[in-house]
Image (tube, rainbow, N blue to C red):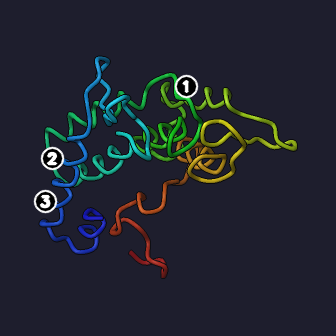
Protein backbone atom coordinates (compact mmCIF):
# COMPACT_ATOMS: atom_id res chain seq x y z
CA UNK A 1 0.00 0.00 0.00
CA UNK A 2 2.75 2.45 0.95
CA UNK A 3 4.62 1.78 -2.30
CA UNK A 4 1.49 2.39 -4.37
CA UNK A 5 0.84 5.63 -2.51
CA UNK A 6 4.45 6.63 -3.12
CA UNK A 7 3.93 5.92 -6.84
CA UNK A 8 1.10 8.46 -6.87
CA UNK A 9 2.49 11.12 -4.53
CA UNK A 10 6.29 10.85 -4.54
CA UNK A 11 6.25 11.39 -0.76
CA UNK A 12 9.50 9.79 0.56
CA UNK A 13 7.94 9.33 4.01
CA UNK A 14 5.81 6.60 2.44
CA UNK A 15 8.97 4.70 1.51
CA UNK A 16 10.02 4.89 5.16
CA UNK A 17 6.66 3.38 6.17
CA UNK A 18 7.06 0.66 3.53
CA UNK A 19 10.52 -0.16 4.90
CA UNK A 20 9.12 -0.47 8.43
CA UNK A 21 6.37 -2.82 7.23
CA UNK A 22 8.85 -4.93 5.27
CA UNK A 23 11.18 -5.19 8.27
CA UNK A 24 8.21 -6.45 10.32
CA UNK A 25 7.51 -9.11 7.69
CA UNK A 26 11.17 -10.13 7.53
CA UNK A 27 11.24 -10.58 11.32
CA UNK A 28 8.96 -13.59 10.77
CA UNK A 29 11.46 -15.19 8.38
CA UNK A 30 14.24 -17.67 8.97
CA UNK A 31 17.26 -18.47 6.80
CA UNK A 32 17.36 -22.20 6.11
CA UNK A 33 20.59 -24.21 5.76
CA UNK A 34 20.32 -24.16 1.95
CA UNK A 35 20.24 -20.32 1.93
CA UNK A 36 16.47 -20.06 1.40
CA UNK A 37 14.68 -17.34 3.35
CA UNK A 38 11.19 -18.49 4.34
CA UNK A 39 8.44 -17.45 6.73
CA UNK A 40 8.72 -19.39 9.99
CA UNK A 41 5.37 -20.78 11.14
CA UNK A 42 6.89 -22.51 14.16
CA UNK A 43 6.50 -26.07 12.90
CA UNK A 44 7.35 -25.45 9.23
CA UNK A 45 8.66 -22.75 6.96
CA UNK A 46 6.77 -21.34 3.98
CA UNK A 47 8.12 -20.01 0.69
CA UNK A 48 4.76 -19.31 -1.00
CA UNK A 49 3.13 -16.21 -2.45
CA UNK A 50 0.13 -16.17 -0.10
CA UNK A 51 1.71 -16.66 3.29
CA UNK A 52 5.39 -17.18 2.60
CA UNK A 53 8.53 -15.34 1.68
CA UNK A 54 7.85 -15.07 -2.07
CA UNK A 55 4.87 -12.83 -1.30
CA UNK A 56 7.17 -10.61 0.75
CA UNK A 57 9.71 -10.79 -2.06
CA UNK A 58 7.32 -9.30 -4.62
CA UNK A 59 7.01 -6.16 -2.52
CA UNK A 60 10.63 -6.19 -1.40
CA UNK A 61 11.89 -6.16 -4.98
CA UNK A 62 9.60 -3.25 -5.84
CA UNK A 63 11.01 -1.35 -2.85
CA UNK A 64 14.59 -2.13 -3.95
CA UNK A 65 13.81 -0.67 -7.36
CA UNK A 66 13.17 2.63 -5.59
CA UNK A 67 15.72 2.67 -2.77
CA UNK A 68 18.88 0.72 -1.86
CA UNK A 69 18.92 -1.28 1.36
CA UNK A 70 21.51 -4.00 2.03
CA UNK A 71 19.31 -5.95 4.48
CA UNK A 72 16.52 -6.05 1.90
CA UNK A 73 18.93 -7.00 -0.90
CA UNK A 74 20.24 -9.93 1.19
CA UNK A 75 16.66 -10.99 1.99
CA UNK A 76 15.78 -10.84 -1.71
CA UNK A 77 18.67 -13.18 -2.52
CA UNK A 78 17.42 -15.65 0.10
CA UNK A 79 13.88 -15.45 -1.27
CA UNK A 80 15.23 -16.17 -4.75
CA UNK A 81 16.70 -19.40 -3.35
CA UNK A 82 13.33 -20.27 -1.76
CA UNK A 83 11.67 -19.90 -5.18
CA UNK A 84 14.07 -22.33 -6.85
CA UNK A 85 13.25 -25.61 -5.12
CA UNK A 86 12.44 -28.50 -7.41
CA UNK A 87 9.50 -29.70 -5.31
CA UNK A 88 6.34 -27.88 -4.29
CA UNK A 89 3.32 -29.90 -3.23
CA UNK A 90 0.68 -27.89 -5.11
CA UNK A 91 0.67 -26.27 -8.56
CA UNK A 92 -1.36 -23.16 -7.63
CA UNK A 93 -0.46 -19.50 -7.69
CA UNK A 94 -0.90 -18.56 -4.04
CA UNK A 95 0.47 -21.74 -2.42
CA UNK A 96 2.38 -23.61 -5.09
CA UNK A 97 4.71 -23.76 -8.06
CA UNK A 98 2.84 -21.20 -10.18
CA UNK A 99 3.64 -18.54 -7.57
CA UNK A 100 7.33 -19.35 -7.93
CA UNK A 101 7.08 -19.04 -11.71
CA UNK A 102 5.39 -15.64 -11.37
CA UNK A 103 7.97 -14.41 -8.85
CA UNK A 104 11.01 -15.56 -10.86
CA UNK A 105 9.56 -14.33 -14.16
CA UNK A 106 9.36 -10.74 -12.92
CA UNK A 107 13.15 -10.54 -13.06
CA UNK A 108 13.13 -11.05 -16.85
CA UNK A 109 11.88 -9.05 -19.82
CA UNK A 110 8.41 -10.09 -21.00
CA UNK A 111 8.44 -13.36 -22.88
CA UNK A 112 12.02 -14.33 -21.95
CA UNK A 113 11.69 -16.01 -18.54
CA UNK A 114 11.07 -19.40 -20.17
CA UNK A 115 14.71 -19.40 -21.29
CA UNK A 116 15.83 -19.31 -17.64
CA UNK A 117 16.60 -22.94 -16.69
CA UNK A 118 14.98 -22.60 -13.25
CA UNK A 119 11.76 -21.14 -14.66
CA UNK A 120 11.75 -23.67 -17.50
CA UNK A 121 12.12 -26.46 -14.93
CA UNK A 122 9.17 -25.13 -12.96
CA UNK A 123 7.08 -24.95 -16.13
CA UNK A 124 7.98 -28.55 -17.03
CA UNK A 125 7.18 -29.78 -13.52
CA UNK A 126 3.65 -28.35 -13.73
CA UNK A 127 3.06 -31.52 -15.76
CA UNK A 128 3.13 -33.47 -12.48
CA UNK A 129 -0.29 -32.02 -11.66
CA UNK A 130 -1.79 -31.48 -15.11
CA UNK A 131 -5.13 -33.25 -15.62
CA UNK A 132 -7.24 -33.69 -18.73
CA UNK A 133 -10.72 -32.40 -18.00
CA UNK A 134 -13.20 -32.79 -20.87
CA UNK A 135 -10.37 -32.46 -23.38
CA UNK A 136 -8.91 -29.38 -21.69
CA UNK A 137 -5.95 -28.85 -19.41
CA UNK A 138 -6.81 -28.34 -15.73
CA UNK A 139 -5.05 -28.35 -12.37
CA UNK A 140 -6.09 -29.47 -8.91
CA UNK A 141 -6.64 -26.85 -6.24
CA UNK A 142 -5.92 -26.64 -2.54
CA UNK A 143 -4.65 -29.90 -1.03
CA UNK A 144 -4.98 -31.52 -4.49
CA UNK A 145 -8.48 -32.74 -3.57
CA UNK A 146 -10.47 -31.43 -6.56
CA UNK A 147 -10.03 -29.49 -9.76
CA UNK A 148 -9.97 -25.74 -9.37
CA UNK A 149 -10.31 -23.11 -12.04
CA UNK A 150 -9.75 -20.08 -9.77
CA UNK A 151 -6.84 -17.65 -9.68
CA UNK A 152 -5.59 -18.41 -6.17
CA UNK A 153 -5.46 -22.19 -6.24
CA UNK A 154 -6.26 -23.46 -9.70
CA UNK A 155 -5.91 -23.35 -13.43
CA UNK A 156 -6.43 -19.58 -13.81
CA UNK A 157 -3.46 -18.92 -11.52
CA UNK A 158 -1.31 -21.42 -13.40
CA UNK A 159 -2.27 -19.68 -16.64
CA UNK A 160 -1.35 -16.28 -15.20
CA UNK A 161 2.07 -17.60 -14.13
CA UNK A 162 2.69 -19.16 -17.53
CA UNK A 163 1.71 -15.86 -19.13
CA UNK A 164 4.22 -14.04 -16.92
CA UNK A 165 6.94 -16.46 -18.00
CA UNK A 166 6.14 -16.90 -21.67
CA UNK A 167 3.92 -14.13 -23.01
CA UNK A 168 5.59 -11.31 -24.92
CA UNK A 169 3.45 -8.72 -23.14
CA UNK A 170 3.62 -8.02 -19.40
CA UNK A 171 1.40 -10.28 -17.29
CA UNK A 172 1.03 -9.63 -13.56
CA UNK A 173 -1.26 -9.83 -10.58
CA UNK A 174 -3.59 -6.89 -10.00
CA UNK A 175 -2.05 -4.33 -7.65
CA UNK A 176 1.42 -5.82 -8.16
CA UNK A 177 1.98 -4.71 -11.74
CA UNK A 178 3.90 -1.73 -13.05
CA UNK A 179 4.18 1.41 -10.97
CA UNK A 180 1.47 4.00 -11.44
CA UNK A 181 3.87 6.31 -13.28
CA UNK A 182 4.80 3.50 -15.69
CA UNK A 183 1.23 2.64 -16.74
CA UNK A 184 -0.55 4.30 -19.64
CA UNK A 185 -3.64 6.29 -18.70
CA UNK A 186 -7.03 5.31 -20.10
CA UNK A 187 -6.64 8.09 -22.66
CA UNK A 188 -3.42 6.51 -23.93
CA UNK A 189 -1.24 9.31 -22.48
CA UNK A 190 1.35 8.87 -19.74
Q: The residue tagged with tag 3: helix, strand or loop?
A: helix
**Mark 2 neighbour density, 10 Å: few (under 14) some (14–19) many (20 or more):** few
Q: CA distance from mark 2 to mark 3?
A: 12 Å
Label whose residue precedes the other's in the sequence (2 or 3): 3
In which quarter of the view is residue 72 placed? Answer: top left
User: Which image quadrant: the C terminus?
Assistant: bottom left
**Going by the picture, which residue comes out furthest to the bottom?**
187
In which quarter of the view is residue 137 placed? Answer: top right
Q: Residue at x 72, y 43 (%)?
A: 147
Residue 188: percent from the left, percent from the top?
48, 77
In front: label 2 or label 3: 3
**Mark 3 neighbour density, 10 Å: few (under 14) some (14–19) many (20 or more):** few
Q: Which residue is mark 2?
A: 68
Q: Which residue is mark 3?
A: 16
In which quarter of the view is residue 57 placed? Answer: top left
Q: The residue tagged with tag 1: helix, strand or loop?
A: helix
Q: Which residue is mark 1?
A: 121
In the image, is residue 115 above or below residue 171?
above
Residue 20: percent from the left, percent from the top?
16, 54
Give the left or right position of residue 7, taking residue 11 as reference. right
Amino acid sequence: MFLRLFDRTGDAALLDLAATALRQDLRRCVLREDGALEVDEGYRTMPYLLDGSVGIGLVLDRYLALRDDEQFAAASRGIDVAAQSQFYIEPGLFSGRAGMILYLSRKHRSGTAGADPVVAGHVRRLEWHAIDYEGRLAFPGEQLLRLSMDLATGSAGVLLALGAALHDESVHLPFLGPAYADRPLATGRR
